[in-house]
Amino acid sequence: MILPFLIIIPLLAAFLITLISGEKDNWAIVLSVLAEMSLLTLALFSFFTTGNDTFIYEMSGWKIPLTICLVQDALSGFMLVIVNLIALTSLMFSISYIRQYSSPWKYYALFMLLITGMNGVIATGDIFNLFVFMEIALFAAYALVAFGAKAEEYEAAFKYAVMGSISSTLILLGIGILYASTSTLTMANIAAELQTKSPQVTHWVAAVFMVGFGLKSAVMPFHAWLPDAHSSAPAPISSMLSGVLIKALGIYAIIRIFFNIFGAPPVFLTIFMVLGSISIIIASYLALGQWDLKRLLAYSSISQIGFILLGLGIGTKLAILGAVFHILNHAIFKSLLFYNAGAVEMALGTRDLRKMGNLRGALPVTTSTSMIASLSVAGLPPFNGFFSKLIIIIAAVQSQHIAYAIIAVIGSLLTLAYFMKVQRYGFHGETVVSEIKKPVSLGMKSAMIILAVLCVVASILIIPGIREITMDPVVSVIMSKTGYVQSVIGR
Amino acid sequence: MKQTEGMTLIVKTVTRISVWLILLYGIYIILHGHLSPGGGFAGGVIIALAFLNVMLAYGRNFINRWVNIGFLHDIESSSAALFLAVGILGMAIGGGFLANFISHGKLYNLLSAGTIPVLNIIISAKVSMGLFVVVWTLSVFHLDKGGKDE
């Protein structure tokens, strides 16, 4: 079984890095890149071998109601591939970027802990274990946000820590209520037990979880921490936070708990749609007014999370396909955009769009990849963002939610507007920039190019033959709702 | 004896006696973790408190002279790696991560319960060193005015 290794490898790498690193970060880089490459290989292998099956790993040789179990199905395989793909490119980008800070080896140890937490959240089948891994990922994230050690970064990390603690407390409260009423912590057993209990239990716990995981995924009324935290972190960490952390801890947990444990109660699907559409519109307006490139991207993340939540809320097969596809696409293009912002910040020393100008000559790779990413997030064909947004809009129309479809279209147009602003002022402005402070290194360039290629290549996942082996199993895990119970304990 | 750092002579003398009792109690809690309430985490916290007691009574410079913080840090990291190693051994021998692969022995004996006492000792090293290094770092940190105030 390979599931436990997805947690063991990064954890071991994290502690070995702290043991063997001296002042230099060479060994830390070697270890973390090796660990991450093996993780990506394992994740790809597990995703493509799983198909429609479910594999269970029981820890320490005990059997299921007594032990912590790890569950591998199409959904967790898909999320593991996304997390480890973005993490590998983020490491490539980090190598020269992080050397501008002091003691860079600490960064790699924390980075590996972040991966441990996210892989753990995705792989686990035990709800308290999910909470523990979530805390591991969050504590690594707080430290990484403050890694630059400036006053504003400490402030952002503190704000993040306060909001994170509030949401974790709520989630722990929800887990406590679930444990009190079902006497088990294994998610599949909880789901089976809840079917015999009064629906009030489900509704109360779901309300608490909605706020808790809503804070983690930063949907609109719960978003206040995100623009600070994501714009203050070093660029590769911003891309990890915006690209995968809010999805692994927020969206994935919401899918697992609301769909697979609670069986998607209709009232919460409506709440998803409402919160999703609020996020789409308001966050887009807020992004439109930003001049700080990374803050703009952070607001854009909130609005794209809104699209994912809207797709989940509509709840038809097509809409969930769109949401799942948008999870992948958003991870790719938002990480790429944060790399672009990081490269510009390193080369020019500014994130203010008004101070950038025309970068075509000075930073050709950054400028062209940012163009691809912007078109992709704005939803223009043939890039991947177009297809996922189109699917969500078509699904909304098909299921008679015309108003939501219109909101999604308006949100898409607003996205196009603020990314035109990014391109117009930031990368194709009037003043031609010829001098740069620090060159963009090969590792940073290749990370950007890989993701830019993926922006185009990911579109082929929508071709029916490929979709049937990649995304359809994921959608069927989500659609089968409490079919999860059957596949985990009904063996 | 000159009073240059730390607390008064009374506190120092009491600490000199009590720190061994605290350490002994911590070790007792760790070694009986599989038999009575407590265990690696609780015992580790008690051991860290013994160290902190010395630091409070004698001052930070005393600790810096007698203890190599880097070494404590290494103990902390390697205990985490050791924990994983025991887990992986369980996978190789006993059929699951962290499986209990040593003979369980007789109930209520000190040497029983297989790998659990071993894991308790590893956890106590991790927790005690981790907690002590955290507080030590906080005490150093106030000297160094980070941010914009420099």
Image: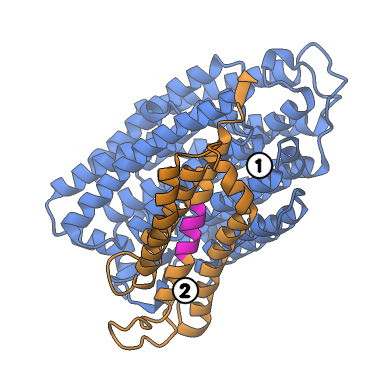
Q: Secondary structure at mark 1?
A: helix
Tell me the residue at 57%/48% (across/down): B63
**What residue sits right under mark 2 in the picture?**
B97
**What residue sits right under mark 1 in the picture?**
A455
Q: Is residue A244 above or below residue A223?
A: below
Chain A hue?
Answer: blue
Q: Secondary structure at mark 2?
A: loop
How much space separates mark 1 and mark 2, taking CA atoms?
38 Å
Q: Quadrant of the C terminus of chain B?
A: top right
Residue A17 rendering spot, x and y as whole percentages? 66, 56
The residue closer to the viewer here, B149 or B83, is B149
Which of label 1 and label 2 is nearer to you? 2
Res. A369 image quadrant = top right
Q: Amino acid at mark 2?
A: Phe
Residue A49 rendering spot, x and y as whole percentages? 54, 69
Tell me the residue at 81%/35% (across/down): A440
Chain B hue?
Answer: orange
| Residues packed near mark 2 inside 10 Å, few (<14), some (14 to 19) or many (20 plus) | many
Query: By what rule are the colours in the image chosen?
Result: by chain
Residue B93 rendering spot, x and y as whole percentages? 50, 84
Please tell me whether residue A44 belongs to the stretch shown in magenta. no
- Judging from the image, mark 1 belongs to the subunit labelled A
Left/right of residue B79 with respect to residue A212 in the rendered view: right
Res. A8 image quadrant = bottom right
Give the residues in magenta: B123-130
